[in-house]
Image (tube, rainbow, N blue to C red):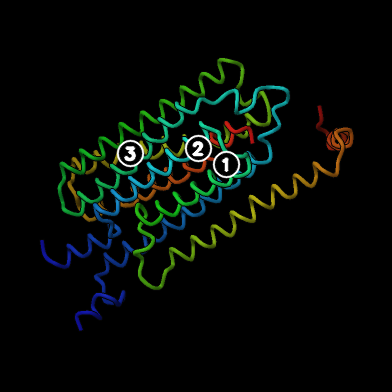
Amino acid sequence: MTKQLITRPVDLPPEAANTDKTLFGFWVYIMTDCVLFASLFATYAVLHNNTFGGPGGRQLFSLPYVLRETLILLTSSFTCGLAVLSARLQHKNKVLFWFGITFILGLAFLAMELTEFRHLVQEGNSWRRSGFLSSFFALVGTHGLHITAGLLWMAVLMAKIVSSGLTRANVRRLTLLSLFWHFLDLIWIFIFTMVYLLGALGV
Amino acid sequence: MSKTSQSTIVRQTGEGTIKSYVTGFVLSIVLTLVAYTLVVHDALSRHLLVALVVGLALVQFVVQLLFFLHLGRETKPRWKLFVLLFMLLVVLILVFGSLWIMNNLNYRMTPAQINTYMNNQGGGF
């Protein structure tokens, strides 16, 4: 009897069933966002040798710099997970602490990405230089835009948690945000590998 | 807190544990550093190196799906997994289809032909 209560979704309280639907809906959104990134990856893969006489990835990218970016984003994904665990135990201050760390790491990542972009543009290697650079800026820039959106969302959510605490609705939002943040880390693995590592190999 | 609301929160937050997050984090760092070291030292043949680096990225993709997004802990019916597999199918068709068509076009057309074609379409250099 008890077992049936747990396993049959019909018997769940209505809020829990709604939360399941929301989580699934958000998961479907994330999967479609993966398709968006796949089209940008495909564009990059087609155009990455079309440098129009300009520099290629091998001359432009600094691997140690990008490795630092990668490790920062990876750590922020981890601290975001710790925030979710603290939310489950209803530790409000810990949630705010781990989200604070995640926010700072995310901001550091974004700042590094923008610094890289600024250097490229200053040296005359903007998106107008070649097909390779157009597709590079489109791909990495779209990821940066997602990071920016995630940071805004995080700031708003932290304010909400400060004002109204870890309510059911806030915990649901926090879970969705953590899914989004882990997904951005997942996309970055492929940018790091396909654009930077393979770019350094001159493939 | 009552037992029901605790289990609701566990359902909401996706059943991750501190162990799963630490495992995922450590594995991801190791995989990233191995791929980085392989590329920086550049000691292997080109084909092997590319295969290894792409392979490591795919392993890390699976690691993060399991330990950060908790895909393995989903109960039947596994709708999330089905949507993920459909996404992968679309992505494969999109990426390999684009590469196939564009490389084929590259192979079959000379630069002069491409220029003429582009001019006819109102573009070109």
Q: CA distance from mark 1 to mark 3?
A: 29 Å
Task: Give the residue type that dot 1 points to.
Answer: Leu
Please tell me which residue lies in front, B55 or A165: B55
Parent chain of label 1: B
Task: Give the residue type that dot 3 points to.
Answer: Ser
- Identify the residue under disc 1: B49
Parent chain of label 3: A
Taking the spot 59% from the left edge, 44% from the top edge, the residue there is B48
Question: Is A172 above or below relative to A187?
Answer: below
Please tell me which residue lies in front, A188 or A198: A198
- Identify the residue under disc 3: A76
Which residue is the extreme one toward the bottom? A1
Please tell me which residue lies in front, B110 or A64: A64
Q: Which mark is residue A8?
A: none
Q: Which mark is residue B38?
A: 2
Parent chain of label 2: B
Image x and y of residue B38, in percent: 50, 37
Tell me the quarter of the image containing the C terminus of chain A: top right
Tell me the quarter of the image containing the N terminus of chain A: bottom left
Image x and y of residue A25, in percent: 42, 59
Q: Is residue A176 left or right of residue A122?
A: left
Determine the secondary structure under disc 1.
helix
Image x and y of residue A189, in percent: 47, 42
Q: CA distance from mark 3 to mark 2?
A: 25 Å
> Is the Cβ of the residue at disc 2 closer than 8 Å to that at disc 1?
yes
Determine the secondary structure under disc 2.
helix
Q: Quadrant of residue A135?
A: top right
Task: Give the residue type that dot 2 points to.
Answer: Leu
Dot 1 alpha-carbon crowd within 10 angstroms: few under 14, some 14 to 19, many 20 or more? some
Q: Quadrant of residue B3?
A: bottom left
